[in-house]
Image (spheres, coloured by chain):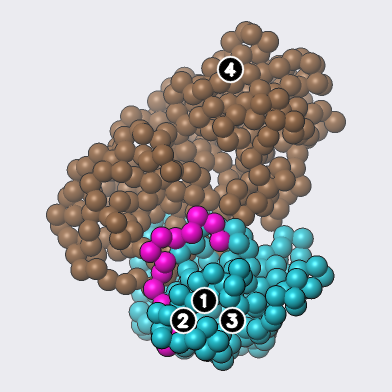
Amino acid sequence: MTEGVQFRLASDRSVLVYFGRKVTLHTHGRLRKLVYLLEMEPIAGVENLHPAYCSLLVVFDPLKLSQRELGAILRDYLRRLDTVRLPDPRELQIPTCYGGEFGPDLTEVARLHGMTPAQVVELHTSVTYVVYFLGFVPGFAYLGVLPEALATPRLDNPRRSTPPGSVGIVGSQTGVYPFATPGGWRVIGRTPLAMFRPDRNNMSFLTIGDRVSFIPISPERFRELTRS
Amino acid sequence: MSLIQVQAAGLLTTVQDLGRPGFGSLGVSSSGAADPISLRLGNRLVGNVESAAGLEMTLFGGTFLFPQGAIVALTGSDFGATLEDATVDLGTSFEVHPGQTLRLGPTRSGARCYLCVQGGIAVPPFLGSASTHILSGLGGFEGRPLRAGDVLSIGPVTRAFRKRTIAPHLSKCLFPRSALRVTPGPQLDWFSPSARRSFFSSTYRIGEQSDRMGLRLEGAAISQRVPRTMITEGVSLGAVQVPQGGLPIILFVEQQTTGGYPKIANVISADLHRLGQIRPRDEIRFERVSWKAAQSLFMEQEKILAFGESILE
């Protein structure tokens, strides 16, 4: 079952495995199965895995493994995908305070779409999202799919710093900034949850494959949760 | 336990080892020393394993007091180091006696100088590594660059001092004054032949905004053949990505793990450490090499480091 899967060298120590050129749950499921297999049965010489929407970057140590050997092993793993049973996805909620100081771009997003801020919040909370992958910085989950009516372009001038917990949207994606990082996503709210904590057993609050929904909370509740 | 008192931290000094591979699926990039070969050699000079943690200084070094003394080596670029006013050589191990102060200043060559001590810099590991990841505030010493007043611990010292020196021929073969060698990026075909020619024939200047996340290049902008939207995908160390504006960015050790810009090229493994010694305003060019050449250049380099007489006693 390696049909439709394409390999491409990204560097002399990494190969991209493409499962398709479209973001679909089916493609993503196959990708997750390969990541799961590679985590359960690690290949000696593979240093890192960078999954994304429909591709996986496999970084290897050329002193331990040649690109040809890696390709052969990966093809072997791909043939076994149908036998892999993924663990049931977790269902998680992200309490989010929308608008105001917590979501400085909410009114602009509403204006762009000819909606009220309340309608934007209603739409954003109406969907159960899938964690496609973690990327960009530690614990940053790419969640999809955002309702089409909310699809919004990137900020023209990215912020130099976005507060941790900021809930942003861009294109058909939504996500939560774990750290104060520069960012071009439109920030519509903020969660008091720590998305990445090195002293926690599950360092990253979200993991690939999780099902996630956003729950609106008041600024008072936000402050309460921040204190606890 | 022996200590290092940081009297002046320098411009940007962090604790680094060889990084923390294996957590890319959490969005955690490997990080680690920007010029890992210099760190490895520094560790060997003082009798450490190559992967021990040292201090990475950037452009302007710090001032360090060693109340209990230490066995030290400086590698990478020449930051004009003095020990109690006497010049100390780069690439040679030396003893710092209790109470002595090591001072470093502005660089006289490349971007980074490494300070290695026997026993290594002792910090609590995060995901198996001592490396500081500045952006996320994780790892290293309190997850941040050093400040004056910080006190670092040195790991256990087990061996007597021996003077060791990096073989002089080594720096020539590790830091050739040639173009940065690259292999094709996964989206090379998104760029027209003229855009590619422009990329491979242009001289680029390293922008002031460059850091451990990425080197920003200034010079000829290159445009895509047809502007297309990319689906975000995993990005590798040394990837040369081209954002809408057309000015390339080379992804570096604290890189994002995924990205949505097309990549025209990727710096070869044998040249990755050289990225750590390029300074803002330096000029660089790119030279395309074959996959086969990239592979053998890396193998040869590792052979020189492992078996060659790279360290003299």
Could one spot residue B246 in this view of the protein?
yes
**Kind of residue indicated by mark 3:** Gly
Q: Which residue is mark 4?
A: B81
User: Element type at marker 1?
Assistant: helix
Residue count near mark 2 (Cα–Cα under 10 Å), binned few <14, some 14–19, many ≥20? some
Residue A8 marker: none
Foreground residue, B51 or A2?
Answer: B51
Residue underneath mark 3: A209
The quarter of the image holding the C terminus of chain A is bottom right
Depth check, mark 3 against mark 1: the one in front is 1
What type is the residue that disc 2 sits on?
A: Ala
Q: What amino acid does circle 1 point to?
A: Leu
Q: Which residue is mark 1?
A: A106
Instruction: From the image, state the color of chain A.
Output: cyan
Query: Can you name the residue that lies furthest to the right here?
Result: B1
Q: Which chain does the brown colour mark? A: B
